[in-house]
Image (spheres, grey):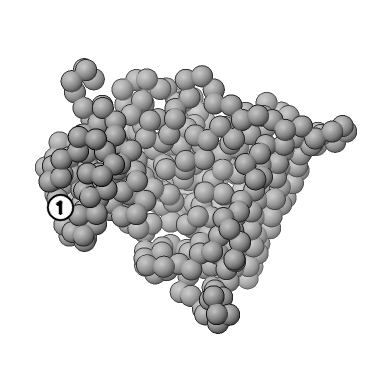
Amino acid sequence: MSAIEKLRVGVIGPGGAGRGRTREFARRPDVEVVAAADVREEAIDQLEALLAEQVPGFKPGSIKRYVGEYEFIEMIEKEDLDIVGVFSPHSLHDIHAKYALRRDLHVLIEKPMANAVGDAILMALLAEGRDRHLVIHYQRHYHPLYVTARKAYREGLIGELVGFDVYLAQRWFGKGWRGDPKFSGGGQPNDSGSHIQDIFLWITGLLPKKVSGTTSRIFEMDDGTKVERPVEIDARAEVEMENGATGRITILGNTKERFTEWVVLEGTEGTLEIKEGKLTFRPKKGEPKEIPPERPEGYPMSNIDNLIGLITGKYGTNYTSAINGVRTAWLTNAILEAGRTGRPVDCGELLRREGFSEEFVRGMIDRWEARGWL
């Protein structure tokens, strides 16, 4: 890309989160946001208002508008885009991203990448076959705390993983489309809970083997009234990983806690704890040691920085590739199924019902690792 060329970006679904992602695109000198598609024109009004306020030099009216349920197709066909940002409700990610990939466009996609693991695998294969970059907006992959935790774990600091405690809680009522099963794909476990499942899987690189547990749709209002919502609010799961490690994954929306999360990884040589913004190693023998977070030299600053750098050749590794979406959808599907049926879920069998196998997914991971897509 020459000094005067800019990558052309079109966005689908610039709602609350999408406006923030679009703003990051628009602030870059090597990118031009040229179009937006949404079912509500008001969403594009709000996007332009935000950009006018927070992006120096942005001119209101400069974004081409595509309003309607299927107008994203017209946007992709007409606008000579390089990148599509998919920020639509969860159930639509699969449709929007696949259409963009089939037009040989690069994609930034909100979490979760897909509601079903089979759809996630097909999306990953499409990106691979088209040789396009697909980056998921799992922002923790770019936070020095989690980057350092992954490095410490992969270097064998705690030895072999034997147990874990993964926890996320926030007051999550499931407002708007997030509370509608047609669009949400699974309530809080598939919304904010997707982040904490992903970061656990990204750090360890392990795949799930068996899941049991419960989910609840009950939310307690401020006045104490309990209401049943159409989607899952809480999930409590016991999980066995492919290496035999067992532990808990707890995702809560029916809580009055401030936003709280932690990942605790117990190994044969000690425990790695990510909690309250700190990374602590607790060896089997000796005193706990806090590990200062560090960003490796040359590491992308964000998902969008990673995507632009992959396209331009600045970066060779995709730190939030589609493999992360595959792993996370697989685990999320198992957690939701266990809660729905009340029975343990064999993750291999779940995958086979989607038309794939553990060996197939492992082969994908090996190929993508060789390409620097992990």
Q: Percent position (x, y) of residue 347?
A: 59, 54
Q: Depth check: give the residue in front, 283 or 213.
A: 283
Corner quadrant of residue 255? bottom right
Residue 56 is situated, as x and y percent measured from the top left of the image, at: 24, 35
From the top left corner, tell me how far across and down residue 55 is, in percent: 26, 38
Query: Where in the figure is residue 196, as x and y percent of width and height?
Result: 56, 49
Residue 124, compared with residue 318, is above or below; it is: below
| Relative vertical location of residue 276 with respect to residue 297 in this rendering, above or below | below
On the image, which quarter does residue 212 sit in?
Answer: bottom right
Say which of 128 and 36 sits in front.
Answer: 36
- Quadrant where the N terminus sits is top left
- Other residues around mark 1 within 10 Å, as few (<14) / some (14–19) / many (≥20): many
Decide if residue 234 is in sight here. Answer: no
- In the image, residue 244 sits, relative to residue 335, either above or below, namely above
Question: Residue drawn 54% across and 26% down?
Answer: 295
Q: Is residue 66 left or right of residue 188?
A: left
| Residue at the spot 36% in from the left edge and 65% down from the top edge | 177
Which residue lies under the disc numbered 1? 66
Q: Secondary structure at mark 1?
A: strand
The residue shown at (51%, 78%) is: 228
Residue lying furthest right: 285
Quadrant housing residue 157: top right
Residue type at mark 1?
A: Tyr
